[in-house]
Image: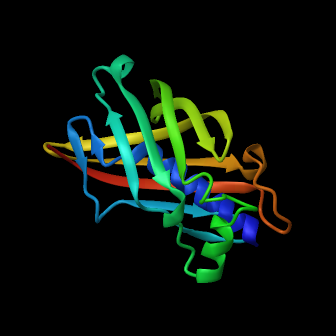
Amino acid sequence: MKGAYYASGIILIVLLSAFAAAYVSNWRVKEDEYAIKFRTKGASGTLSGLQGVIDFDTADLKSSHFDVTVAVNTIKTGIWLKNRHAKAADFLDAERYPTIRFASSAITPSKNGFVADGALTIKDVSKNVSIPFTFDHTGNEGVFRGNFELDRKDYNLEKNRVGETIQIELVVPVRKR
């Protein structure tokens, strides 16, 4: 079960990193309203505490990019012991690898919204990932929403009796600066 918590935390961190940066080019995240959730076979929870920049303009996707990090120590599963296990040296190793980073290389339109392609770095492993998302906005407010899955083993997050797939959900309300 420890592995599920850790993997879920990683995924949430990545999603937070990708879509919930403290500032979004012309947008500012509504810090008390965003949600980054993760779920595996054996655990679920949230991540918070993000930093970075999101430059996003639906009319200029070629110049848009994400480069964000999330602090591993913000993982919350609702159970203190699970949080501690997720941060431990044998899983996410928060002391040695305090952040998870997503840096996009391209943002492209898709049938249902957009896709951010880029490198997701968890611990000392970087893998190319594609994160589908939508951005709905009216006037001075908008919301980024994204869902994707990761395989925890791709990032050397090995634990017994933990689901291999980590599902991540992002809901990031923003307001124009």
Residue 41 visible? The answer is no
Q: Residue furthest front?
A: 96
Q: Residue furthest top?
A: 62
User: Between residues 61 and 23, which one lies in front from this camera angle?
Assistant: 23
Q: Position of residue 117 (x, y in %)?
A: 54, 29
User: Between residues 87 and 174, which one lies in front from this camera angle?
Assistant: 87
Name the image quarter holding the C terminus. Answer: top left
Give the vertical position of 135 relative to 83 (above or below).
above
Residue 2 placement, left or right of 114? right
Q: Position of residue 102 (x, y in %)?
A: 51, 39
Tell me the residue at 43%/35% (across/down): 67
Q: How many marks?
A: 0
Give the vertical position of 65 relative to 22 (above or below).
above
Residue 31 visible? The answer is yes
User: Between residues 98 and 31, which one lies in front from this camera angle?
Assistant: 98
Name the image quarter holding the N terminus. Answer: bottom right
User: Between residues 22 and 73, which one lies in front from this camera angle?
Assistant: 73
